[in-house]
């Protein structure tokens, strides 16, 4: 048995999308809809415990009781979220969101090594398309054999469903793949699907515990920007190359 595929989360893993992307887009959307809501950094960090933008809005209304001058129906939530998505995509198009250190390098190296690639995320397909096209080019989504996004499954992370869907579409076992995550709920989803998982800490996940990960890194690394191992065995590698990922995979079979 050998490593066959890499499966990537998107938000926080492929790109630091949360603070300069999703958070600012939510607040802009609230203003447009005349809502007296403002999510600061700390509140948003708490809200990230809920996976999915629409679900996050519902949770905020339910748990934080913000001021509302009228009842919000399901369609209202959808409209707010659609506007937020529109704003988020415009921020990507304007170059305000970039890939994380080492991501483009690892993707290209994996393709050259004939590893199959997949995406498993709760963000929308529109968001993924915009990010890939803006950072890697118009045909970049074609690098990924499976793109599992948004509401394609009934239960979002931390449920393992989106990862199981990706595995089913790849026709691979969890033992054939390595997942890449940044958040506690994403990590829980991946390991619940049986996947060996590499964690790269993101802007909102620096204090989380990822016991059982193959390794926890600050980022994937470049030649001039070596990674730091936060939790895991010391290594002579300074970048998360395909060879390094394969070494982690073989060590933990």
Image: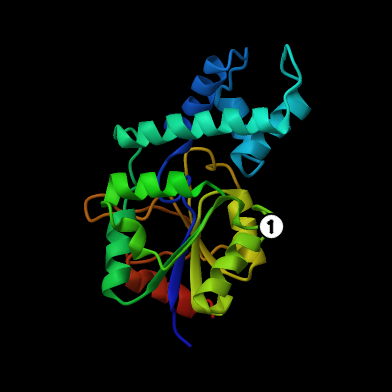
x and y, in percent, of residue 227 in the image: 35, 53
Q: Is residue 186 left or right of residue 89?
A: right
Residue 202 can be seen in this image? yes
x and y, in percent, of residue 208 in the image: 60, 46
Query: Up-down: is 53 above or below 29?
Result: below
Total labels: the figure holds 1
Q: Residue furthest left?
A: 224
Query: Up-down: is 75 above or below 149?
Result: above
Q: Nearer the viewer, residue 188 or 51?
A: 51
Q: Is residue 52 left or right of residue 241?
A: right
x and y, in percent, of residue 32 in the image: 52, 17
Q: Residue furthest bottom?
A: 1
- Residue that carries the numbered disc 1 in the rendered image: 159
Q: Is residue 189 left or right of residue 180?
A: right
Q: Residue at x 22, y 56 (%)?
A: 223
Q: Residue furthest front?
A: 75
């Amino acid at each position: 048995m050998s490593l066959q595929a890499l499966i990537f989360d998107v938000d926080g893993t492929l790109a630091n999308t949360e603070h300069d992307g999703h958070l600012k887009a939510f607040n802009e959307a609230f203003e447009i809809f005349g809502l007296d809501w403002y999510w600061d950094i700390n509140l948003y960090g708490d809200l990230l415990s809920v996976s999915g933008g629409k679900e996050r809005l519902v949770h905020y209304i339910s748990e934080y009781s913000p001021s509302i001058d009228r009842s919000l129906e399901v369609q209202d939530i959808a409209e707010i979220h659609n506007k937020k998505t529109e704003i988020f995509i415009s921020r990507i198009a304007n170059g305000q969101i970039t890939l994380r250190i080492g991501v483009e390098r690892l993707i290209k190296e994996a393709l050259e090594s004939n590893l199959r690639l997949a995406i498993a995320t709760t963000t929308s397909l529109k968001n993924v398309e915009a990010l890939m096209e803006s950072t890697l080019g118009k045909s970049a989504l074609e690098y990924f054999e499976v793109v599992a996004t948004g509401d394609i499954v009934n239960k979002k992370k931390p449920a393992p469903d989106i990862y199981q869907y990706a595995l089913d579409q790849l026709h691979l076992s969890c033992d054939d793949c390595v997942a890449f995550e940044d958040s506690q709920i994403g990590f829980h989803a991946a390991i619940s699907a049986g996947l060996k998982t590499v964690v790269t800490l993101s802007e909102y996940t620096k204090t989380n515990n990822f016991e059982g990960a193959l390794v926890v890194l600050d980022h994937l690394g470049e030649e001039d920007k070596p990674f730091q191992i936060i939790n895991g065995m010391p290594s002579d590698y300074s970048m998360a190359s395909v060879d390094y990922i394969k070494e982690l995979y073989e060590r933990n079979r």
